[in-house]
Image (cartoon, rainbow, N blue to C red):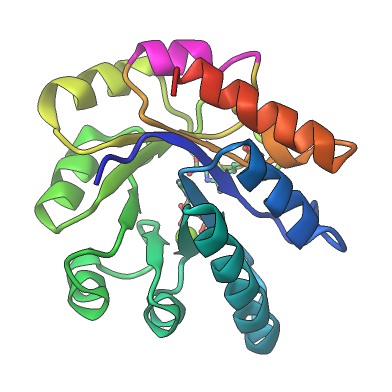
Amino acid sequence: MTLRGLYAITDSQLLAGKLLPFVEAALDGGLTLLQYRDKSSDDARRLREAEALRGLCERYKAHLIINDDAELAARLGVGVHLGQTDGPLTPARALLGRHAIIGSTCHSQIELAEQAAKEGASYVAFGRFFNSSTKPGAPTATLDVLDQARARLSLPICVIGGITLDNAAPLVAHGADLLAVVHGLFGAESAQEVTRRAKAFNTLLSI
Ligand SMILES: Cc1ncc(COP(=O)(O)OP(=O)(O)O)c(N)n1
Ligand SMILES: Cc1nc(C(=O)O)sc1CCOP(=O)(O)O
Ligand SMILES: [Mg+2]
């Protein structure tokens, strides 16, 4: 499976009251991956929303990824994204099976990415590259790590953190395969604008 393209990530506050229409608008513009990221502990709502997103992703042939929660991903038969404190990759791979997409946060450390590759990650994520209103305190990353990753790894490279249509081009030039975006995609006034942005991100990636 080739993993390249726009990787939309939901945000419960930003998308309050418009989760499904804005996600569908993004899918209409073209998504490779959609991550359901909800940091709450409202398990019933998380299950309901994730099921609805899975249905949309199936219709548009995109892959759904659940943030943090391998058990929920297993229940839905979808992928998971794990950060450095979200539990080890090896049991998640055993739980989800060899075909599941499993992503790993590697901040700006090539050693973390090499370890993730050994443990069966499907892609490695570096960031944050720019100021992020979604996660202002995330550790920073520079373009150097993308050059190192391109040279040393064969896994798809995901970039994240403050990415917009105005600043994404250098990331692509330095080897990013997946542009992971919250605000730069969903921080729009209308569903039509979300679709326009998604198409423009895909043009940047030339896909
Ligand atoms: C694609 C992608 N990359 C990085 C992250 C961040 O994961 P993590 O460090 O576990 O932080 P939280 O998102 O869980 O707050 C991500 N979610 N997705
Ligand atoms: C969830 C997340 N993780 C990051 C990391 O660097 O690991 S940055 C981030 C937030 C991404 O949202 P936005 O596109 O609005 O900046
Ligand atoms: Mg996490």
Instruction: Using the image, determine if residue 103 lies above or below residue 128.
Output: below
- Where does residue 176 sit, x and y in percent of width and height? 37, 25
Query: Any magenta on residue 132?
Result: no
The structure residue drawn at horizontal position 14% and vertical position 32%, both measured from the top left corner, is: 153
187 or 111: nearer the eye?
187
Q: 45 and 107: which one is in front? A: 45
Q: Is residue 99 above or below residue 158?
A: below
Residue that lies at the very extreme toward the bottom in this rendered image = 44
Residue 65 is situated, as x and y percent measured from the top left of the image, at 45, 61
Span shown in magenta: 166-174
Establish if 185 lies above or below 36: above
**Residue 5 in the image, given as x and y percentages of width and height:** 44, 33
Q: Is residue 190 left or right of residue 111?
A: right
Q: Is residue 169 magenta?
A: yes
Pick whichever, 191 or 162, lies toward us.
191
- The answer to whether any part of residue 155 appears in the image is yes
Confirm whether residue 36 shows in the render. no
The image quarter in which residue 39 lies: bottom right
Residue 28 position by quadrant: top right
Name which residue lies at 65% across and 54% down.
10
Which residue lies at the image location 70% right of the left edge and 52% below the top edge?
24
